Amino acid sequence: MSQLNSQQAAPAMQELKVGVIGGGFMARTHADAIRRAGAQLIGVRSNGEQSTQRAAAALGVPAFESVQALIEQCDVIHITSPNALHFEQATAALEAGISVVCEKPLATNAHGAK
């Protein structure tokens, strides 16, 4: 097993571009965790325009015009939106090749879970 030395260091966390979908309490909690981990929080998208603008102001990041626009700019997406939206949003991110951190549940029915 090889080990990384200082010359072969893995990419720094700050190079990871992370977005948050959702604008409530859990969005703030996830944003704090993202920053504490050293990753770059690049933006937020919530359910509506007003909600997105409020979340962006609260988190100190840009507001994105759509979930898809945010996904396209990220390495990792955190989903903190209402439960009924998790499956659709997680699927969009996964299909784009983006890693997903999702508040539970990932799906709200057996079909989505399968």
Image (cartoon, rainbow, N blue to C red):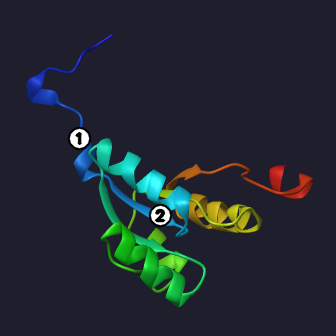
Q: Residue at x 46, y 52 (%)?
A: 30
Q: Residue furthest right?
A: 110
Crowding around mark 1 (Cα neighbors within 10 Å: few <14, some 14 to 19, many 20+) is: few
Query: Is residue 68 at all visible to an observer of this figure?
Result: yes
Left of 60 or right of it: where is 101?
A: right
27 or 88: nearer the eye?
27
Quadrant where the N terminus sits is top left
Q: Position of residue 114 (x, y in %)?
A: 84, 49
Instruction: Using the numbered discs, state the Cα–Cα distance from disc 2 to disc 1 in whole angstroms.
Output: 21 Å
Q: Please, is residue 13 above or below residue 16 in the view?
A: above
Name the kind of residue labelled 1 in the image.
Answer: Pro
Question: Which residue is label 2 attached to?
Answer: 20
Q: Residue furthest left?
A: 7
Crowding around mark 2 (Cα neighbors within 10 Å: few <14, some 14 to 19, many 20+) is: many
Q: Which mark is residue 27?
A: none
Q: Residue at x 40, y 46 (%)?
A: 33
Left of 99 or right of it: where is 109?
A: right
Mark found first going from the N terminus, 2 or 1: 1
Q: Position of residue 18 (x, y in %)?
A: 38, 58
Q: Please, is residue 58 above or below residue 16 in the view?
A: below
Secondary structure under tag 1 reads loop
Q: Residue at x 71, y 68 (%)?
A: 85
Q: Which mark is residue 11?
A: 1
Looking at the rendered image, the disc whose residue lies closer to the viewer, 2 or 1, is: 2
> How many numbered discs sit on the rendered protein?
2
Name the kind of residue labelled 2 in the image.
Answer: Val
Left of 70 or right of it: where is 8?
A: left
Query: Is residue 72 at all visible to an observer of this figure?
Result: no
Q: Quadrant of residue 24?
A: bottom right
Q: Please, is residue 53 above or below residue 4 in the view?
A: below
